């Protein structure tokens, strides 16, 4: 059974990692996919993903667009509406980390993380709720992090951005629930992506794994499975929640 048959889903930052996993999972369940990438170095991967999704029998289109720029978000969603006519699902996945001890962190490093991780969620959500309110239906899924719940030394900017997403998610859920628009967050733990590749090496990797009850890092598919559940009718009575997908790291 395809859980998202005929739905239109926006996914930011989907050329690789968690975003790519979500895009492929959604497409396998019948969703048409509009996704973004931000750097020229990701253009080839984005084109390959677009082609792969199209070959699965659904519509897909990639846009180079910076989710941390309001004007680009506005233009992107406008283009999606022209191309796909509507938006049913928005996954705010784009994110970066610029780890540094607070004493050494520059204002520019702080601002870049907040802009990409937190401001982008506001910018994109503000755009997609317009068609969702019109149709009185929609679901928004924001990618937070277990670090936003626990904090972590050297990641104050990242933790602040991801904690902000949780508060934003709860507020949006309260504002838009009466319009049948759901808003939830996912808080992944350590996931095997390019961003965390350095964590898997040597003794450091084993140390991190030792703190995870399930004894392993998550795969992108682990996160995609939960995202699919929240996006589908199976999650129709869930809103304003943060689902931790961390292998028990936060117990």
Image (cartoon, rainbow, N blue to C red):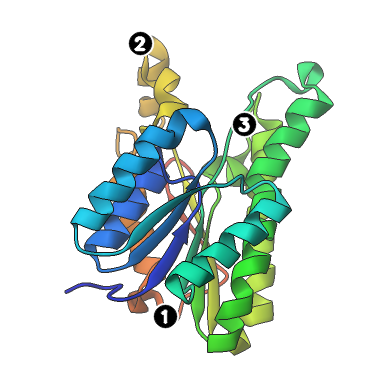
The disc, 2 or 3, on the residue closer to the chain's N-terminal end is: 3
Front-most of residues 111 and 210: 111
Classed neighbour count for the residue bearing mark 1: other residues with Cα under 10 Å, few (<14), some (14–19), many (≥20): some
Residue 246 at least partly seen: no
Side of 162 where 3 appears, left or right: left
Classed neighbour count for the residue bearing mark 2: other residues with Cα under 10 Å, few (<14), some (14–19), many (≥20): few
Side of 152 where 156 appears, left or right: right
Q: CA distance from mark 2 to mark 1?
A: 43 Å
Q: CA distance from mark 1 to mark 3?
A: 33 Å
Given this view, does label 2 or label 1 mark the residue nearer the observer? 1
Tally of numbered discs: 3
Q: Which corner quadrant holds the N terminus?
A: bottom left
Q: Is residue 155 above or below residue 49?
A: above
What residue is shown at x 45% (from left), y 68% (from top)? 83
Residue 213, given in percent of the width and then of the height, sits at 34, 38
Residue 54, given in percent of the width and then of the height, sits at 25, 56
Front-most of residues 71 and 115: 71
Residue 6, given in percent of the width and then of the height, sits at 31, 76
Residue beneath label 3, please? Answer: 152
Find numbered disc 3 in the image and state the secondary structure of the residue it sits on: loop
What residue is shown at x 35% (from left), y 54% (from top)? 23
Which label was assigned to residue 202?
Answer: 2
The disc, 1 or 3, on the residue closer to the chain's N-terminal end is: 3
Tell me if label 2 and label 3 are in contact, CB under 8 Å: no
Find numbered disc 1 in the image and state the secondary structure of the residue it sits on: loop
Residue beneath label 1, please? Answer: 236
Residue 180, given in percent of the width and then of the height, sits at 54, 86
């Amino acid at each position: 059974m395809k859980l998202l048959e005929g739905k239109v889903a926006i996914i930011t930052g989907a050329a690789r990692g968690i975003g790519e996993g979500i895009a492929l999972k959604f497409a396998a369940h019948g969703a048409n996919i509009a996704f973004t990438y931000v750097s020229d170095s990701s253009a080839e991967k984005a084109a390959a993903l677009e082609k792969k999704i199209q070959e699965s029998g659904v519509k897909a289109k990639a846009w180079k667009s910076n989710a941390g720029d309001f004007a680009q978000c506005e233009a992107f969603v406008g283009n999606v509406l022209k191309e796909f006519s509507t938006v049913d699902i928005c996954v705010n996945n784009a994110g970066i980390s610029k780890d540094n001890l607070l004493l050494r962190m520059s204002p520019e490093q702080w601002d870049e993380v907040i802009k990409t991780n937190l401001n982008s969620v506001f910018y994109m959500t503000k755009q997609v709720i317009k068609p969702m309110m019109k149709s009185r239906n929609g679901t928004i899924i924001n990618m937070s992090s277990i670090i936003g719940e626990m904090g972590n030394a050297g990641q104050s900017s990242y933790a602040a951005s991801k904690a902000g997403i949780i508060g934003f998610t709860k507020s949006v859920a309260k504002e838009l629930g009466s319009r049948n628009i759901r808003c939830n967050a996912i808080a992944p733990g350590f996931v095997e992506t390019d961003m965390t590749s350095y964590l898997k090496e040597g003794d450091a990797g084993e140390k991190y794994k030792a703190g995870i009850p399930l004894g392993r890092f998550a795969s992108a598919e682990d996160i995609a499975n939960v995202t699919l559940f929240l996006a589908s009718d199976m999650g129709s009575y869930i809103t304003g929640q943060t689902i931790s997908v961390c292998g028990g790291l936060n117990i």
